[in-house]
Amino acid sequence: MSKPGIPQGTRDFTAETLRKRNFILNTIRREFELYGFQPLETPAMENLETLMGKYGEEGDKLIFKILNNGLNDPKNTDKAKEGFEKLMDGKNSPLLTERALKYDLTIPFARFVAMNHGQLTFPYKRYQIQPVWRADRPQKGRYREFTQCDADVVGSKSLLNEIELANIYHAVFSRLGIDGYQLKINNRKILSALAEHCGGADKLTDITIAIDKLDKIGIDKVKEELKVKGLSDDQINSIEKYLCISGNNEQKLSAIKDLLGGFTQAIEGIDELNHILQNSQKVHLSVDFTLARGLNYYTGTIFEVKAPEEVKIGSIGGGGRYDDLTGLFGVSGIPGVGISFGVDRIYDVMEEMQLFPVDLQTGSTALFFNMGDKESLFAFNVMQQLREAGISCEIYHEHAKMDKQFKYAEKKKIKYAVIIGSKEMEESICLVKNLSTGTQQSIPVSQLQTVIFDQV
RNA sequence: GUGGUUGUAGCUCAGCUGGUUAGAGCACCAGAUUGUGAUUCUGGGGGUCGUGGGUUCGAGCCCCAUCAUCCACCCCA
């Protein structure tokens, strides 16, 4: 028997971690509910064809695929071998795998909407908090199993949705105390116009991928990459002009108008940005034309949230508008917009910046000491009354030295020690010791409940 | 998928150019202390040095493989 372990990039969560995670999740959930979003959950696995081709070439490689059962059945071996041959050619085959773990929450959501559009009331606002899986190699801020928190509105083109979503971002990060975050916004229509301007509408993806890297690799490397992708010097120069746009939001918008004002797409994108900015003054959005985002189903507004610079974790959330996501599943005409929070990275940011409230880690309210067989049974009955009143408490499992029982309480961050020994039992009193202050008082058992309630 | 880092007790780590029986701190257990958390003192349990090969008279240390880990790239939350 080898040592037990868990798969690469996955984690067990202990109480301390879960309390912190739940703090984040509850904050996000509360905000989603406040804006009228309703919960939804979809299965851990989807049919492989539902997911394939939706995340680009790189994305497809990172989908965890599930091997079919029964491949060793003699009547299936020929098919299994055929499937394996295809696999070796880099193709997926339903003969070998037809299910996969979900890669994000958006595509399964689109699948759900396409399946149920007849029953849903539009605009349909849903939020979803579930794990997703990616066959990436783990590193800082990257896991193979991680949790996403998405909110999407489908069946509405209104920019009011974008404004609401921006406000949710702002509210959540403010509540969590992550003040140094940056909420970036751009519009895919502007990027499309740029691609058109550079004579290569078909090069849109290459262009977006290259300029997305600007802050990481610098302008020269971006130009190099564009050249490799087959763009002419003239086209690259236009892109350079585009990338050099700077200043505050207004300055940037007027500069982009000068550059791409001749394209109707660009005008639309600029107007949309303007409208969103003017109506979400409290949210400090910053326009960033280099923001592209990899997922190629976005068509309008795109959002990305960057963690504060000092933690070097990068993106902790993102989203955008898509015109026709359900069209991928044969149901057209349902536009939508959504955002996502990366809980695991938000956790890492908060841990590194020490933003978790200290009082998150509390155990039971009271520990009843075990002072012997008779005493502990007496204490047990007293304790049950507290439990019935909704006060969480526990009793030490065996008669042991007080030193040990104190240490147990300390480790489990229990607030009060309740001591009932033979003397106390006779007089029907108990000793209540506040473990953080060290003060102790003797009170009748009948008053225990009110005393603890008053002090909690 | 590509490149690198690290792997020694429950945890954090030390272990010299290969040399007797692999160490420390913390944690744990027992006692000093038969009803009060600290501190102190005394004693104690714990390790097939990630795994498998190889070189050597001799390997925790050198070589190869493998697994795990963390980091960077690709891509992304």
Image (cartoon, rainbow, N blue to C red):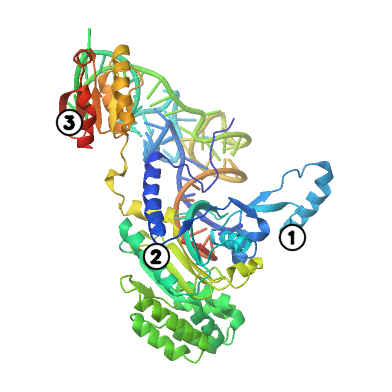
Q: Which is more toward the observer, A177 or B63?
A: A177
Q: Badge 2, how many Cα within 10 Å: few under 14, some, many 20+?
A: some
Question: Percent x, y for residue A155?
Answer: 53, 69
- Residue holding disc 2: A306
B41 relative to A309, above or below: above
Q: Secondary structure at mark 3?
A: loop
| Gap in angstroms between the C-alphas marked 3 and 1 | 70 Å
Q: Quadrant of residue B35?
A: top left
In the rendered structure, the answer to whether residue A47 lies left or right of residue A211 reads: right
| Gap in angstroms between the C-alphas marked 1 and 2 | 38 Å
Q: Residue at x 59, y 84 (%)?
A: A200
Q: Are marks 3 and 1 in contact (CB under 8 Å)?
A: no
Question: Percent x, y for residue B70?
Answer: 45, 50
Q: Badge 1, how many Cα within 10 Å: few under 14, some, many 20+?
A: few
In the rendered structure, the answer to whether residue A300 lies left or right of residue B15 reads: right
* Three-letter amino acid code at the position of disc 2: Lys
